[in-house]
Image (spheres, grey):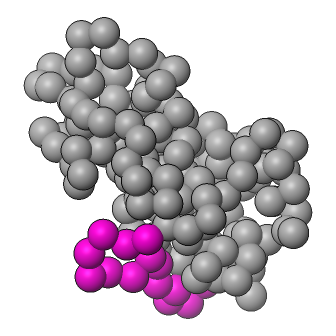
Amino acid sequence: MSQIENRLSELGLALPPSAPSRALFLPGKITGNLLFLSGQICEWEGVPKYFGPVGEDFDMDEGQAAARMCALNLLYSIRAVAGSLDRVSQIVRLGGFVAAPPGYGDGPMIVNGASQLFIDLWGDAGRHARTAVNVASLPANALVEIEMTVELNS
């Protein structure tokens, strides 16, 4: 088990057993020392768990849990493509998408659920540039989708 997976376990979290693709794309692609990861929705082993769009009785903790689930799927993809989470030098960029109605202003707060996990795992190396936007809908009617770029050690 990698050092990062040990930290994940200390946080009471675990990687999903799988993160199947919904379409014809790679989970990630390495070029040079950068790993570009495809977007992951809030699903567990291919089964969506949080649905959008944000409604009137929306629970922010639940929204952040959805973003954290996306992050766990991304961690699975890092391990699958790079071989180990310990190869991550730093998290470079994160893009977050939240299914929400026009005028909803708290999409970035939802995406914080993913950002916080990376900071908890890598400290300052987990801090990243980020975009968080609201969209009309996401694949499988998911609440959140997250994509990211990481820098790898050689």
Q: Residue furthest top?
A: 57
Q: Position of residue 45 (x, y in %)?
A: 49, 60
Query: Which secondary structure is most common in the magenta stretch?
Result: loop
Q: Looking at the picture, tell me which residue is in the foreground, 151 or 80.
A: 80
Q: Which residues are magenta?
A: 20-34
User: Which residue is rendered at x = 37% and y = 48% of the image?
Assistant: 48
Image quarter for residue 33? bottom right
User: Which residue is rendered at x = 72% and y = 52% of the image?
Assistant: 14
Dividing the image into 4 quarters, which one contains the N terminus? Answer: bottom right
Answer above or below: position of 78 versus 59: below
Q: Position of residue 52 (x, y in %)?
A: 25, 34
Is residue 149 visible in the rendered image? The answer is no
The question of residue 124 being in magenta is answered with no
Image quarter for residue 91? bottom right
Q: Position of residue 139 (x, y in %)?
A: 23, 54
The question of residue 30 being in magenta is answered with yes
Query: As drawn, is 78 to the left or to the right of 100?
Result: right
Answer above or below: position of 41 versus 149: above
Dividing the image into 4 quarters, which one contains the C terminus? Answer: bottom right
Q: Position of residue 98 (x, y in %)?
A: 30, 38
